[in-house]
Amino acid sequence: MGDKSKATFEKRQKELKRQKKQKEKAAKQLARKGEKTRDTPRAGGEDPDLAGLIPGPNQPPPEEAGS
């Protein structure tokens, strides 16, 4: 009968280890999420990749303009 309690104890330890790892993983994800929001300040809410672009119809390419 000693084997059964040993197996139960090992299962419990394994489950506790798994739960601990999940908590650590969640904490890391939360930290990364906080870093991402902190690292991308935008002035006026404008995307830096789109700054200075004017919406509207595009100009035809130079080789098609003469045709």
Image (tube, rainbow, N blue to C red):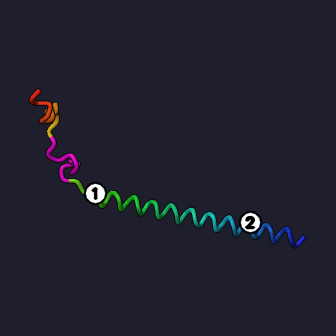
Label 1 amino acid?
Thr
In this figure, which residue is indicated by the disc labeled 1? 40
Q: Residues within 10 Å of mark 2 (few under 14, many from 20)?
A: few
In this figure, which residue is indicated by the disc labeled 2? 11
- Quadrant position of residue 22: bottom right
Query: What residue is shown at x 31% (from left), y 60% (from top)?
Result: 38
Label 2 amino acid?
Lys
In three-dimensional space, the C-alpha distance between marks 2 and 1, rounded to whole angstroms, equals 44 Å
In the picture as drawn, the residue positioned furthest to the left comes out as: 66
Would residue 44 be counted in the magenta stretch? yes
In the picture as drawn, the residue positioned furthest to the top comes out as: 67
The span shown in magenta is: 43-53
On the rendered image, what quadrant is the N terminus found in?
bottom right
Q: Specify which label sits upstream in the sequence, 2 or 1.
A: 2
**Image side of residue 39 versus residue 48, left or right:** right
Asked whether the residues under the numbered discs 2 and 1 touch, taking CB atoms below 8 Å apart as contact, a structural biologist would say: no
Q: Position of residue 28 (x, y in %)?
A: 47, 64
Q: Is residue 66 above or below residue 42?
A: above
Q: Position of residue 40 (x, y in %)?
A: 28, 57
Total residue callouts: 2
Q: Residues within 10 Å of mark 1 (few under 14, many from 20)?
A: few
- Quadrant position of residue 36: bottom left
Query: What residue is shown at x 52% (from left), y 63% (from top)?
Result: 25
